[in-house]
Amino acid sequence: MASKLTPAQRVALARHPERPGTADFIKHLFTDFFEQRGDRLCRPVIPFIDPPGAYPGLEAEARGQAEAIARTLALSSRLTVPVVSVVTGEGGSGGALALGVGNRVLMLENAVYSVLSPEGFASILWKDASRSDEACGVMKLTAADLLELEVADRIIPEPEGGAHTNPAALFRTLDTALVKELNALGKLSGPALAAGRYKKFRAMGAKALRKEREPHLPLSGSGPAGTGAGRPRPRRNRHLPGGHSHPGFSFPRRRLPAPKGAGLSGGYHML
């Protein structure tokens, strides 16, 4: 039954108010927990990812939110210990990105992981936040989607009806998966862990780009089946290696009037 859930239904489960949170996972998966601030004990790092998104207001930026996210990304990419990131609920925007630079990325079955919320996506793309359910199907944000795109490495099954229906069973399943991942990563040297993490993220999106180029994919226009005729060719983007289109979506450039006072040269917004 769980496999029949729509992306919008999975988003709803990821946001369920009774879904286990980070404090629950810490309590049931670890012993002798204590808070560390700045200590480096050469131990594995296990980030639990469940932020709906970084707050986009001026106050957050004034307090250095973007810089904090960037600094966390830079630090995480250089760590020489195993990093296993676990997306447990709604992993959204920069907050999730900052915690997701792992050697392995695990996702609970009904968790979601995306660049922004479905409501934000619908508001930006269609100027209509009420189309958020439709956006869920376009964004490729479910665990199954991201496993196929090689963003996630493993899906952690949830109890029937969602994680909140039987948290104890979920904790046992996740515990087993974490032990397996850490045992495998523990055999690698520090430099190998950092290099492997770098290689993983440099390759991210390559599979989506390959699929975009395959001639047998469904056509978006008319033409003989399998020939690619009628399908709009993705525009080359000089800002990406090799001039390729964006691996997830290919948006054309449009010339839009610049907002008053924006100071944009030529009045361009890049979409």
Image (cartoon, rainbow, N blue to C red):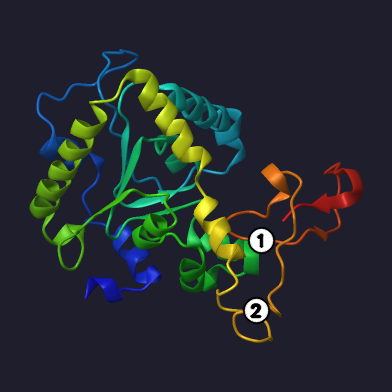
For the N terminus, the image quarter is bottom left
| Residue marked by disc 1 | 250
- Residue name at image x 68 percent, y 82 percent: 221
In this orientation, which residue lies closer to the viewer: 210 or 29? 210
Residue 266 image point, x, y percent: 91, 48
Q: Quadrant of residue 19?
A: bottom left
Q: Which residue is mark 2?
A: 227
Question: On the rendered structure, is 204 left or right of 212?
Answer: left
Q: Name which residue lies at 24% across and 71% down.
A: 2
The three-letter code of the residue at mark 1 reads Ser
Regarding mark 2 in the picture, which secondary structure is present there?
loop
Along the horizontal axis of the image, is 164 left or right of 13? left
Sequence-first tag of 1 and 2? 2
Whether residue 146 is situated above or below residue 86 in the rendered picture: below
Q: Quadrant of the C terminus?
A: bottom right
Q: How many marks?
A: 2
Q: Secondary structure at mark 1?
A: loop
At a point 72% along the width and 67% down the height, the residue shown is 233
Query: Where is residue 35 drawn, in percent x and y?
Result: 24, 21
The x, y position of residue 38, in whole percent, is: 35, 14
Q: CA distance from mark 1 to mark 2?
A: 20 Å
**Which dot, 1 or 2, sits closer to the camera?**
2
